[in-house]
Image (cartoon, rainbow, N blue to C red):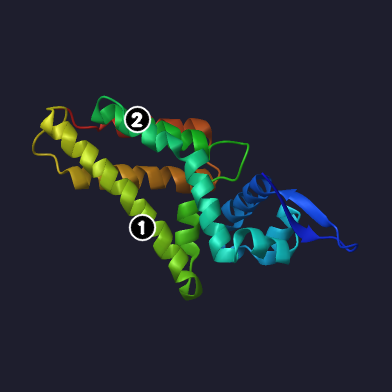
Amino acid sequence: MKAALCCSGRGRPREFDVDEALAAALRVFWSKGYEGTSLSDLTEAMGITRPSLYAAFGNKESLFRKALDLYEHEKLNYIRAALEEPTARAVSERLLRGAVEIHASTTGPRGCLGVISSVACGADAESIRDEVIQRRASSNAALVARFERAKTEGDLPAAIDAAGLTSYLIAILQGITVQAGMGASREALDALVDTSLTMWPSA
């Protein structure tokens, strides 16, 4: 999508691709986190001026939210697919394997954008931290509901605490994120998933 939002020195509009600019902003936020990213970092990576950034995306906070939407759409689509798996164990394995696939990729920054930004945010960026936490809570609630369904279907033991099982799975996912960010190999992350799945409760 093209946008003629930046004026050249001769007064003619200079077009830029909004989608490409947003993708570039995402890579910067993903690499440096919200607070670690400056407007200069963004405009340099996006190839636009500050007035163009403001005109197309609003302020830095608004741009981050749009980047987070893009991140969830492109990088976290495996979560929606996982929830449709026929068993709770298959749901969990697809989530874990999907996380490894994303975080061990060599084509982009390592680690999770949401985790990076929520951990790093101080008081000045509290609204961003709250935004990330709210989005994560929504995903967690969907997992709890899926595991409750598995209990009803007899796929999980009736005594299992669906919320506790979700917390356990999220802890493993966060461990994958942190270890990937520290440079863990794909093999090591796969081994972590394999070990975790051996502990999965059966009906």
In the image, residue 86 sits, relative to residue 71, either above or below, namely: above
Query: Disc 1 marks which amino acid?
Result: Gln
Which label belongs to residue 134? 1
Residue 190 position, x and y percent, is 44, 31
Image coords of residue 92 (percent x, y): 31, 33
- Residue at 64% x, 58% y is 56
- Is 2 on the left-hand or right-hand side of 199? right
Type of the residue with mark 2: Glu
- Crowding near the residue tagged with mark 1, few <14, some 14–19, many ≥20 C-alpha atoms within 10 Å: few
Q: Position of residue 104 (x, y in %)?
A: 53, 37
Q: Position of residue 160 (x, y in %)?
A: 13, 39
Q: Quadrant of the C terminus?
A: top left
Label 2 neighbour load within 10 Å: few <14, some 14-19, many 20+? many
Between the residue at mark 2 and the residue at mark 1, the CA separation in whole angstroms equals: 24 Å
Residue situated furthest top in the rendering: 86
Q: Nearer the viewer, residue 90 or 21?
A: 21
Circle 2 residue: 93
Residue name at image x 46 percent, y 49 percent = 178
> Which of the two discs, 2 and 1, sits closer to the camera?
1
Rendering quarter of residue 79: top left
Outermost residue, left side: 159
Sequence-first disc among 2 and 1: 2
Q: Callout 2: helix, strand or loop? A: helix
**Of residues 45 and 156, the one drawn nearer to the viewer in this rendering:** 45
Whether residue 32 is visible, yes or no, is yes
User: Residue drawn 42% across and 34% down?
Assistant: 78
In the foreground, 144 or 62 = 62
Position of 192 with respect to 107 (left or right) is left
Residue 191, label in figure: none
SS category of the residue bearing label 1: helix
